Amino acid sequence: MDNLRYPIGIQTFSNIIEEGYAYVDKTAYIKPLLRQGKFIFLSRPRRFGKSLLLSTLKSYFEGRRELFKGLAADRMDLDWTPSPVLRFDFNAEDFSLDNGLESLLNRLLKRYEKQYGITDVLDTIAGRFSYLIEKVAEATRRKVVILIDEYDKPLLEIEDNKELFEKNQRTLKSFFGNLKSMDEYIRFAFITGVARFSKVSIFSDLNNLKDISMADEYANICGWSERELIDNFRTGIMTLAKKRKENFETTISAMREYYDGYLFSEEGSRLYNPFSVLNALDLKRIDPYWFGTGTPTFLARRVRKRGTFPPDINGQMCTREELIAVGINDLNPIPLMFQTGYLTIAEYHSEMNLYELQFPNREVEIGFYQQLLPMYVPEVNDPDSPFRFTRFKTDLYSGRPYDFMDRLNALFKDLPGEDHREPTYRAITYLLAVLSGSQSIAEHHGYKGHSDLEVIAGNFVYVFEFKYNKSVAEAMAQLHDRDYAGRYAMESRTVYLIGVNFNEKKEERGLLYEIEPLRN
C-alpha cells in the first residue's frame, strides 16, 4: 500500500521534513556550492525544484541541523553557524501591473526592515537593498545570505509589453547591481530563474556571478534521475501500476515517455520532472501536468512567425554560447526554448562543439504543440467549431479518413489568404495528427525513401504523401512505387494510403485527395 505523502505545491524544506512528506535528498550539493564561489546563478525550467532547493539552503544557513538528520548534509563537514538570510521570491506577484515589480520589492524590503528595526531607509529600492544588507550584517555581526527565486518572472510575464519590460529590466539591473559592492557583507548569494537574459544586461554589474546552469557537476541538482525515482517512490509506482493493470516495468516505461528526458549538460543523466511525477503518483494517472502551469505563448508565436515545420524543432543545433546568452527579443526562439525547458540536450557533438536539441518527453511536446496550433487555427479550442481538434481526433480513431480530409479541406479554405502556403498546410496537418493523441511520424525513412506523414490511431494507420500545385495522381503513384506502407503489411490494423495535392493558387485554393484502403 502506498503511504507516501506527496508534497504537491509544497516548496518549503522544513514543512516537507517536519510533516513527513516524501523528499529526494539533494543536500549533498550544499558543500560543493559553498566551495564554488560567493555569487551563484542557476537556470532551470519552472516547476523543477528550484524553490525547494533555495528553501533547503535557507534552512542550512539558518543552522537548522535537526532538519537534516539522516540526509547527506548531516554527514558532511559543514559549518552550521547560523547566518541572517534574506530571501526574495518573485513568484507571488502580478507583473502585468505597471508597478507590480516595485510593489513586490517594496513589500519584501519593508518586511526585513521591520524585522531588523531599520527605520532610516533610503529613497530608492536599490539603495534600500544595499543599506538593508549592510545594517543586517552589522546588527547580527554575521555576513548575510541572499536567496533570489525566479528573478526573471517580471520579464517573462510581460514579454509583449515593451515599455514595461524595459522598465522592469532597469529596476532589476539596479537592484542586482548593488550586490557586488556589498561583497564584504555577503556570505553567499544564490539566484535562480528560468532563463539568463544576458543580452539585457541585468547582471552586467555583477560580473563575478558564477553560472552553474550547464556545469556537469550540478547537472542533477534539480530534477530526479530514474534511480532516484525508483529508490524513493517504489511503492507509489507499484500502486500506479496496479491501477493501470500492468507490471512495474511497463509503468516505468510510460512514466519515462511522459516525464523523463531532461539533460542539462553533456555529462549529466536524464532527469524526470518532479512536479509531473508527484502529480501522476498522487492522482494515479499518467497525464500531462507540467504544461498546464503556464506555457509562455510568445515562444509559440515566434515558432509560428519563423515558419518552422513543427517536427523540425527536434534536431536544432546550437552552440553553448547561444544556449547561455539569451535575449528576450531574439528572433530565434530555440535557445530560450532550451532554457525554459521545452527543449533539452539530445546529444553533444564534440567534434563540432554543437548541442543537438529535442523535446525532452511526450508531455512537453504535446503541451507546446497545444500552444502552437491556435497560432494557425484560432478556433481549434472552440467547442462549437467544426475545426475543434477533438473532431479531427474522432475522425482518425474512428477510421473516417474521408471526414478527416473533408474537414481539413474546409479548414484550409477558411484560412486568411497569406496563410495559403506549403509550410502552413504541412504544419497544421502534422499538429492535428499529433494532438489527436496518435503516434505521428513525419518523414519516416524507409528503404525506398521517406514518407511525408504516418499516423497510427488505434486500429488504423494513415500514410500520407503531400504534393503542392502538382496532382493527386503523382502522390498516389509515389505511395505505391516506394511502398511506404510496406512496414505495416503484417499488422492487423486497417491501413489507408492518402495522396494529397495542396493548391496554393488563388482560384484553386484548398486540397484534392484520394484515399485507398489496404486490406491485410
Image: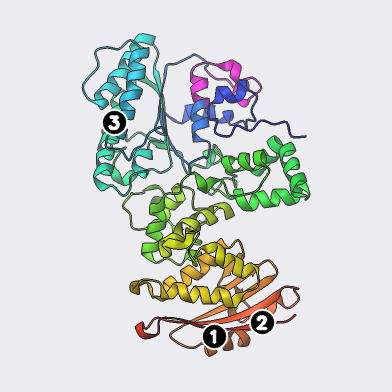
The mark total stands at 3
Three-letter amino acid code at the position of disc 3: Glu
- Residue under the point 70% across and 76% down: 494
Three-letter amino acid code at the position of disc 2: Pro
Q: Camera-side residue: 492 or 70?
A: 492
Image: magenta residue range: 56-79
- Residue under the point 52% across and 17% down: 79
Q: Which of marks 3 and 2 is nearer the N terminus?
A: 3
Q: Camera-side residue: 247 or 209?
A: 247
Q: Earlier in the sequence, mark 2 or mark 1?
A: 1
Q: Which mark is residue 102?
A: 3
Residue tagged 2: 517
SS at circle 1:
helix
Residue 416, image x, y percentages: 35, 71
| Distance (Cα) linking label 2 and label 1 | 15 Å
Query: Is residue 347 among the parts visible in the rendering?
Result: no
Residue tagged 1: 475
| Proximity of marks 3 and 2: CB atoms separated by less than 8 Å | no
Q: Quadrant of residue 183?
A: top left
Labels 2, 1: front one: 2
Q: In this view, does 58 lie above or below 155?
A: above
Residue 119, image x, y percentages: 27, 12
Residue that extends furthest to the front in the rendered view of this protein: 384
- Residue under the point 22% across and 25% down: 124
- Residue under the point 30% across and 29% down: 103
Q: Which mark is residue 77?
A: none
- Residue 74 magenta-drawn? yes
